[in-house]
Amino acid sequence: MPAALMNDSAALTWRASLLDRLSTPLGAAWLCLFVALLARAVQFGNPVIHVDDQFYLFVGDRMWHGAMPYRDIWDRKPVGLFLIFAAIRALGGEGVIQYQLAATGFVVATAVVIRAIARRIANPRGATAAGIVYLTSLGISGGDGGQSPVFYNLFVAVSVWAMLAAVERPRFDRRAVLLGSAAMLLMGLAIQIKYTVLFEGVFLGLVLLWRAWKCGHSPAAVLALALGWTILGLASTGAAWWYFAAAGQGDAFVYANFTSIFDRRAEPVDVVLGRLAAIVIRLIPLSVAAWYGIAGARARDPDETPAKSLARRIIAGWALAALGAVLIFGSYFDHYALPLYVPLAVAAAPLMGDPKSGVALIIRGKSRLMTTAVFLIIATSIVTATTSARFRKERGTGPEVREMAAMLKPLLKDCLYIYDGDPILYMMTNSCLPTRWPFPDHLNNKREVGAVGVDALTEMRRIMANHPTYVVSRTSPQSKTYTPGWDEMQVDLARDYRSVAEWQVGPSKRVIYQRIPGH
């Protein structure tokens, strides 16, 4: 055999051996950790990745100082999300790098579970690629920090794994019931991080009940299972309501968590459709791979077992349930798409494990095949990197907000008021709170007017009547700004305050206003 061919053969053998080692459960776990650190490290230590992350961390911090969500700090997120960030604050330090490392741990664990689920319908290489693609895709939709799906996707993935383990058993026996119960309990915990998970939970429950029925359980037994699993799924939310009700905050909990969302003003149709179009465009490559991964599975594997066929259909249904949860709630901010990456990555695993599928490239006049797995990993990594760079330019990287905090902290004698700015300043300056609504959007966003339990103008006037020494705002309003509130604030600031510092953050400036003595 010619030396060149022998060298090529040795190289191919070595590469195949390496891929096989990286596709084992342990090898895949280490690979996922490496990829996650590589994909997310650029944002480590950045306190302004997203305004939501800032607020969650701030609330988690204040809970250690006795603050109660909904009573002392108003928001409509489930309390489970704040408990996660409160637990992270127990790690000490500033809190920023701590929550980002914790989030990284969650996404690595999610990727490992994705691989375990995908092994039911794909070979080890395809399943491992599914976990990797999940990690490289998160940043495309703003998942490079601590958005809620970064955390609850793990609970959902483990729930799906447990559900499939129950469904694939030949009889729906005691072990199947226990697995189904674990799945519903975990979905209940996920619901207390974000309520939209309910749709996926309902789908999982229906699959379990269908399987129990098909395995010969009586209608009464199926009904009993349905009741028991419903109780388990709602247990976390019921416990949260009971806690707040016992503290005399039951009405506040119900309004914040369930009814206030219906009071929000509708956004312009063109804005909403534009966001939806952006989500669709970002998801096209993985969605196409998922479609062919599921629809083309039988063609690639004519001897597909009934168990694999059933798992494939369930995973397709799961993806549709997750899609329904995204579509029904509207708004369509980029991070709303994050839950879709889990079922789509799993569904794409069979295609990514097929060495004959991919994208044909012409290199030096010769056709070369880039496998689907390699194409998706490279494409999502590039888009994640460019998206992260764009967000860092638009939102800042941290020095600005740290400089603001360093200036304000020794000067504060009363409560700082952040009318329009970064809520993490409350935490960084250890400022007291001038209002129950410290998240700026709740009082300055026109969509929130009448949807937070207080009149925005009345609350803003009350805050300013207390004469806060320092106010943080911008030099110009945003498109979402509530104009009457902005106009009135400008009058107050022009009359009673002076600008003492400005920081350029992305396209806008943050301004610190100091009250003029005697005003």
Image: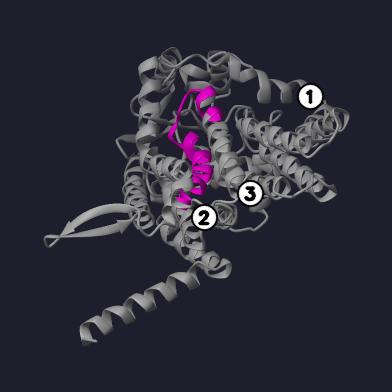
Q: Earlier in the sequence, mark 3 or mark 1?
A: 1
Counting from the top left corner in percent of width and height, residue 195 is at 64, 31
Q: From this viewpoint, is residue 426 visible?
A: no
- Residue assigned mark 3: 307
Q: Which residues are magenta?
A: 324-350
Magenta-drawn stretch, dominant element (helix, strand or loop): helix
Q: Say if mark 3 contacts mark 1, CB within 8 Å.
A: no
Q: Say if mark 3 contacts mark 2, CB within 8 Å.
A: no
Examine the structure image and report whether residue 493 is included in the region drawn in magenta.
Answer: no
> Residue 122 has which mark?
2
Q: Earlier in the sequence, mark 2 or mark 1?
A: 2
Q: Exactly how many numbered labels are in the figure?
A: 3
> Residue 250 has which mark?
1
Element type where label 3 sits in the image? helix
Say what amino acid the circle numbered 1 marks: Gly
> Residue 330 has which mark?
none
Q: Residue at x 27, y 78 (%)?
A: 8
Q: Residue at x 79, y 44 (%)?
A: 172
Element type where label 1 sits in the image? helix
Q: From this viewpoint, is residue 216 visible?
A: yes
Spatial CA distance of label 2 from label 1 is 47 Å
Residue with the most extreme left position: 365
